[in-house]
Amino acid sequence: MAWDALLLSFVGFYCGYRCYNYAEGSDRLKFLGLSIAALVFATTQASVVVDGWLDAIDLTLYSDIVVEWGHIIALAFVLSALAVFIRQSKPVFAQFPLVYAALPLFIVLSYVLVANTYALKDWLLSIYQGGAILVALLMYSVYTYREKRYMYILVGIILFLITFIIYWYIPGVNENTGWLWKTLLISSLLMTLYGYEYARKKNPSSKDTIQI
């Protein structure tokens, strides 16, 4: 059994469930986006586990395809949620139209154009992942500088960055030490989730925004 995929699936479903519980009021859209992203990611990992079971009876779920498209869909929702975070961090007069926050969802369509080009789609996927992490890192660096209650979220994002670097830029990591980036990914998810809970606990009335 793919125990690593099973664990990632459990963590993903848990994070998705917790984020969904935060989807209320003005926080609804951003946490709903994160919840969908986490649930899609968890589903991709669950497909790997199911594929392992089916393989024993000479059947397949084509989990590679599920994982590939699940990752790009999850990334699209993460970027869209980050756009909502950015919008709400600005004064009302400086906020861009909410519909613009849905634009990252169109990266799924752009991925269709390169889906059959192995090198190009990996390059595109790494750019999307790196872009999401960089935006979150810059945003929560400012948040943490102004309010220390965001520090655990920033730690989680830094762990995401380390995971990203290990996965994409250390040769042979998937074949030899795949457990390393997967452990870091789980730590990143749980730390970021804890960070949101910590920030809300420190200021329950907060809408998780900073007026700048």
Image (tube, rainbow, N blue to C red):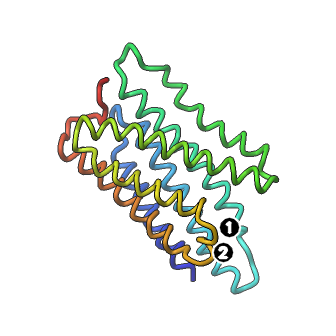
Q: Quadrant of the C terminus?
A: top left
Residue underneath mark 2: 51
Q: Residue furthest front?
A: 170
Against 178, residue 35 (above or below) is above
Q: In which quadrant is the N terminus drawn?
A: bottom right
Answer above or below: position of 56 versus 150: below
Q: Is 41 located above or below residue 97 in the figure? A: below
Q: Amino acid at mark 1?
A: Ser
How packed mark 2 is, by other alpha carbons closer than 10 Å (few <14, some 14-19, many 20 or more), is many
Report if the CB atoms under discs 1 and 2 are less than 8 Å apart.
yes
Residue type at the position of mark 2: Asp
Give the quarter of the image for residue 85: top left
Q: Quadrant of residue 15?
A: bottom left
- The circle on residue 154 is none
Furthest toward the bottom, the residue is 56
Residue nearest the viewer, comparing 134 with 211: 134
Instruction: Give the spatial CA distance, label 1 vs label 2.
Output: 6 Å
Circle number at residue 63: 1
**Seen in the image, is 110 located left or right of residue 201?**
right
Residue at image position (55%, 73%) is: 178
Looking at the image, residue 20 sits to the left or right of residue 96; the answer is left
Q: How many marks?
A: 2
x and y percentages locating residue 49 in the rendered image = 59, 75
**SS of the residue at dot 2?**
helix
Residue 110 in percent (x, y) is at: 72, 40
Determine the secondary structure under disc 1.
Answer: helix
Residue 76 at x, y = what percent? 58, 43
